[in-house]
């Protein structure tokens, strides 16, 4: 190790290794993390001479054993995880083995592969900066090994200059290189989803609404949909077991078909708008949809107007959706009507008696439903994120006892009464509203915008009923963050969230600026696909015929390569000649007049030996010149004062040699 690594080299190598391990810590098995820690300790102790480098037989044994253990541990996670862990294991083993420059090259190149894998798991701006730091460290390792004893400022300047010179080429390649399909699928996490789930019970969405985590962002081609119409549909539930609303077997079967790309053909009217969605990873298949939406490529429609992706959303995904005025519905089948009216045989006797009494009084079922909504508005019902616990008969407890709840409480109770009255009904969960940023023309929908509402079958079409609108109309018109902004309930568990302190002007400006940057990053970097690439290039070359389009792109690439070449080598700048070289050139010119010309590849020592034969000056003077010249030329650690002194001596010797 001491033959080619010094303290400076090893510092960058160890720092790079620890940084890489830390960056991928969440994706790496603890066994491999522990192995990496042991490698770091061994390498540091070895540097101080306390332990020898491992021999070839020991390295082979450790490689085979650790590889087998790694494969056994991560095998259940799939091929991708096995590949990731084996690459990290190779990175660790090479770190342990470093004995030559070639080993350093393999170590650095493996590090670049790990940075590429890092981008599969992380896509935010902050993580991009972390990746940039990792790349700088890897380049610093190369420069520290090949750059000799560069001073600290010179080392940093050269490192940054190299990176900045390559940046224009990286940007151009990012813009023009076609987007290829993925070579593998991301492993689906065991805990399948974040955000909305495939079932709902009272209080569940209330817990979700305490989070300010981003769910998705949306931008409209035309005017944005009004706040009161921003019902983003995600899940539809038509089965009730007395406690939880979930999807029936027929709905689940349709969900399975959607994963295979089988879509339900909907009869839609004239298109009224288009919306671009950037959905945060939730490890499920749903895509938020306004009424009524038609999916694009890779998405399918369900019979309940929801949208699904054919692959799980495991990273920020971009979806383009068209919106339509209305939809042509089909009559309910006998099986569908039966499912939409089904209720448990037992439970909620008070509610059943209340409905039966109203029916005996001859009140129309639609009027009974209107009266229930009116009770939500005029009686002691209240809207809260912290509803009291309910018993087994939660509809009875809510309507006649607690009268305090979140959207699911009101939707579930209304839906239960509607089915008792023989009105087909279903529950829809999704998101309501969204914060519109007029300056940047996009809206952010967060987890606290999660909502539940009801759809009833009336006059051969589905009619949306939102019971929450009667108890808390400000929730519909303004959104949850506005309606509860002065309440201690809003984001009670997120004291440091910028959403919570949006009433402070400076913090709110910071929050909106961060959101704007993040939206642009997601739109133009994370989700820069072939369609966006084509639109961007067409906007640049609208007047260029298709026949010459790619030749134009090629020309730009060549021009950029030429620009980088010129910036690096600067042929227009005359090479600066050192003072010692000037003196050596003087000596060559003097003796060339006497018939001695320096040959190509001839060293200064050889030249001085030949020159001494043609001069009356002592040979020791020529030896002194070559010695002084070589020391000035090749000694790296020469101080400024010593260099000045030797230059003066070299100049004096040069004058003496030109007198012979």
Image (tube, grey):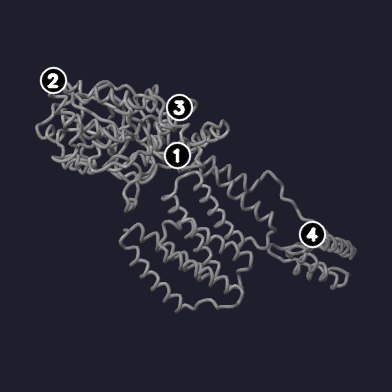
The mark nearer the N terminus, 3 or 2, is: 2
| Gap in angstroms between the C-alphas marked 4 and 2 | 113 Å
> In the displayed structure, would residue 147 be above or below residue 534?
below
| Nearest-to-viewer mark from 4 and 1 | 1
Q: In which quarter of the image is residue 400?
A: top left
The mark nearer the N terminus, 3 or 4, is: 3
Label 3 Cα neighbours within 10 Å, binned few <14 / some 14-19 / many ≥20: some
Q: State left or right for residue 616 relative to residue 370.
A: right
| Residue topped by disc 1 | 491
| Residue topped by disc 4 | 580
In the structure shown, which secondary structural element does the residue marked by tag 3 occupy?
loop
In the structure shown, which secondary structural element does the residue marked by tag 1 occupy?
loop
Picture residue at 47% right of the left edge, 77% below the top = 56
| Gap in angstroms between the C-alphas marked 2 and 1 | 46 Å
Marks 3 and 4 in Cβ contact (< 8 Å): no
| Residue topped by disc 2 | 362
The mark nearer the N terminus, 2 or 1, is: 2
In the structure shown, which secondary structural element does the residue marked by tag 2 occupy?
loop
């Amino acid at each position: 190790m001491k033959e080619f690594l010094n303290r400076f080299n090893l510092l960058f190598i160890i720092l790079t290794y620890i940084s890489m391990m830390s960056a991928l810590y969440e994706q790496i098995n603890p066994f491999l993390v522990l192995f990496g820690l042991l490698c770091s300790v061994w390498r540091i102790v070895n540097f101080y001479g306390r332990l020898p480098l491992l021999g070839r037989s020991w390295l082979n044994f450790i490689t085979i054993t650790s590889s087998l253990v790694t494969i056994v541990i991560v095998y259940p996670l799939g091929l991708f995880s096995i590949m990731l862990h084996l690459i990290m294991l190779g990175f660790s083993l090479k770190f342990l083995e470093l004995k030559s420059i070639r080993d350093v090259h393999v170590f650095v190149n493996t590090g670049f592969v790990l940075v590429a894998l890092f981008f599969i798991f992380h896509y935010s701006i902050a993580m991009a900066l972390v990746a940039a730091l990792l790349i700088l460290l890897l380049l610093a390792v190369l420069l520290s090994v090949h750059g000799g004893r560069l001073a600290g400022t010179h080392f940093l300047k050269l490192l940054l200059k190299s990176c900045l010179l390559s940046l224009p080429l990286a940007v151009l390649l990012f813009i023009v290189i076609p987007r290829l399909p993925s070579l593998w699928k991301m492993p689906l996490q065991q805990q399948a989803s974040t955000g909305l789930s495939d079932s709902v019970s009272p209080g569940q969405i209330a817990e979700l609404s305490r989070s300010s985590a981003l769910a998705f962002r949306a931008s409209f081609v035309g005017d944005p949909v009004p706040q009161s119409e921003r019902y983003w549909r995600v899940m539809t539930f038509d089965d009730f077991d007395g406690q939880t609303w979930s999807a029936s077997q027929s709905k689940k079967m349709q969900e399975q078909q959607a994963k295979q790309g089988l879509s339900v053909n909907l009869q839609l009217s004239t298109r009224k708008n288009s919306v671009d969605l950037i959905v945060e990873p939730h490890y499920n298949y749903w895509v938020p949809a306004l009424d009524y939406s038609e999916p694009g490529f890779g998405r399918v429609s369900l019979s309940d107007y929801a949208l699904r992706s054919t692959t799980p959303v495991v990273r920020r995904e971009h979806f383009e959706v068209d919106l339509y005025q209305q939809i042509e519905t089909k009559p309910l089948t006998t099986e569908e009507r039966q499912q939409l009216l089904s209720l448990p045989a037992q439970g909620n006797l008070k509610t059943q008696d209340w409905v039966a009494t109203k029916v005996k009084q001859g009140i129309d079922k639609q009027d009974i439903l209107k009266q229930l909504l009116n009770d939500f508005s005029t009686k002691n019902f209240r809207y809260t994120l912290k509803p009291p616990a309910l018993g087994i008969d939660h509809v009875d407890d809510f309507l006649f006892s607690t009268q305090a709840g979140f959207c699911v409480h009101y939707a579930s109770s209304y839906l239960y009464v509607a089915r008792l009255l023989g009105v087909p009904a279903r529950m829809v969960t999704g998101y309501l509203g969204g914060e519109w940023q007029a300056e940047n023309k996009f809206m952010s929908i967060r987890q606290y915008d999660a909502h539940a509402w009801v759809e009833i079958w009336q006059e051969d079409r589905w009619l949306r009923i939102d019971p929450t609108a009667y108890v808390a109309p400000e929730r519909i018109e303004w959104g949850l963050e506005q309606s509860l902004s002065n309440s201690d309930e809003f984001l009670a568990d997120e004291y440091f969230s910028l959403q919570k302190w949006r009433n402070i002007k400076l913090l709110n400006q910071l929050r909106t600026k961060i959101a704007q940057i993040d939206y642009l990053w997601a739109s133009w970097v994370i989700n820069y696909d072939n369609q966006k690439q084509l639109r961007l290039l067409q906007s640049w070359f609208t007047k260029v015929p298709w026949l010459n389009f790619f030749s134009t792109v090629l020309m730009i690439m060549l021009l950029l390569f030429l620009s980088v070449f010129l910036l690096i080598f600067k042929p227009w700048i005359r090479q600066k000649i050192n003072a010692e070289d000037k003196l050596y050139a003087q000596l060559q010119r003097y003796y060339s007049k006497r018939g001695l010309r320096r040959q190509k590849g001839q060293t200064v020592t050889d030249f001085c030996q030949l020159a001494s034969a043609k001069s009356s000056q002592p040979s020791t003077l020529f030896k002194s010149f070559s010695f002084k010249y070589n020391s000035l030329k090749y000694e790296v650690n020469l101080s400024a004062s010593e260099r000045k002194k030797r230059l003066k001596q070299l100049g004096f010797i040069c004058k003496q040699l030109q007198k012979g």
